[in-house]
Image: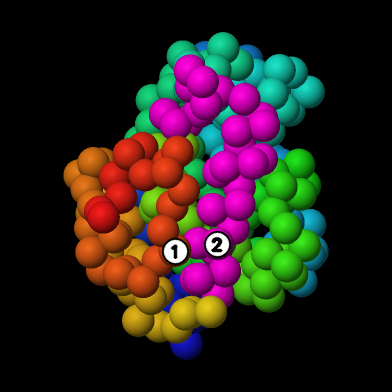
């Protein structure tokens, strides 16, 4: 049933959003480094590696510069147009094609690079690999402002590995354990709501039994005590 809705929603979205996507392709082609798409290896269902599609928002060699696949707030590798595309999440829209290809679902754990996936515990990795990764999901909703979190004292790979990754892993485990059509549609609704109201706390109100974040993240994640 979820696969049916994945095909329906991704196909419909590509059709409806085509008037937006075409101008973005042209802007990227004639700005920055001239790259339109960024393809990157990500860990998928059953540990299978696939090529994730994004609009190009960073320097072509970014994975080999600075903090690698971890992006900080104000990261100098981000291109001028890329800042807007990342903030609005428009850069993620090419993943609608990944959904059509069967690599991803509309809702699921966020597909990670080998570097960031390795920050999860072995238990979390095995649980997350049971399902298709998602364009959005519980972890993506809660950490929708991750780049904003990664600044100041938090702007380090150690902070990501020791604070963010373990909690994000708990959220993804929660999703896999509670996965179903109800969570699927609720997550789609909350994702759309959060795009319009970025500071919303609605996820905490709807998913009341989510794991509680560590104290270092409560304020940044708009946690409701």
Distance, label 2 to label 1, CA atoms, is: 7 Å
> Quick check: is 91 in the magenta stretch?
no
**Helix, strand or loop for disc 2:** helix
Task: Give the residue number, with chain letter if any, for mark 1.
Answer: 211
* Camera sees residue 105: no
Q: Residue at x 54, y 35 (%)?
A: 55
Q: Position of residue 96 (x, y in %)?
A: 51, 56
Majority SS type along the magenta span? helix
Q: Residue at x 76, y 42 (%)?
A: 115
Is 223 on the left or on the right of 148, as rendered? left
Of residues 135 and 160, the one nearer the viewer is 160
Of residues 146 and 53, the one nearer the viewer is 146
Q: Quick check: 81 above or below 194?
A: above
Disc 1 crowd, CA 10 A, few/some/many (<14, 14-19, 20+): few
Q: Are the residues tagged 2 and 1 within 8 Å (C-beta)?
A: yes
Q: Position of residue 178 (x, y in %)?
A: 47, 80
- Please tell me the numbered disc located at residue 170: 2
Q: Residue at x 57, y 69 (%)?
A: 173
Q: Residue at x 44, y 22 (%)?
A: 83
- Image quadrant holding the C terminus, namely bottom left
> Which image quadrant for residue 97?
bottom right
Q: Position of residue 142 (x, y in %)?
A: 40, 51
What's drawn in magenta, residue-wise? 147-176
Q: Quick check: 126 above or below 28?
A: below
> Which image quadrant for residue 187?
bottom left
* Camera sees residue 181: yes
């Amino acid at each position: 049933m979820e696969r049916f809705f994945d095909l329906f929603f991704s196909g419909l979205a590509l059709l409806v959003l085509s008037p937006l996507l075409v101008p973005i392709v042209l802007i990227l082609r004639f700005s920055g480094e001239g790259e339109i798409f960024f393809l990157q290896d990500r860990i998928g269902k059953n540990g299978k590696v696939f090529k994730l599609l994004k609009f190009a928002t960073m320097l072509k060699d970014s994975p080999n510069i600075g903090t690698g696949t971890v992006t900080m707030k104000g990261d100098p590798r981000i291109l001028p147009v890329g800042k807007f595309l990342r903030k609005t999440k428009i850069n993620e829209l090419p993943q609608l094609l990944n959904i059509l290809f069967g690599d991803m679902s509309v809702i699921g754990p966020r597909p990670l690079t080998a570097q960031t996936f390795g920050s999860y515990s072995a238990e979390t990795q095995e649980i997350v690999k049971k399902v298709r990764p998602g364009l959005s999901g519980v972890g993506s909703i809660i950490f929708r402002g991750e780049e904003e979190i990664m600044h100041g004292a938090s702007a380090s790979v150690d902070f990501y590995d020791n604070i963010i990754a373990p909690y994000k892993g708990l959220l993804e485990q929660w999703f896999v354990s509670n996965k179903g059509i109800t969570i699927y549609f609720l997550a789609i609704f909350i994702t759309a709501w959060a795009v319009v109201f970025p500071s919303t706390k609605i996820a905490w109100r709807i998913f009341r039994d989510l794991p509680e974040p560590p104290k270092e993240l409560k304020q940044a994640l708009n946690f409701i005590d």
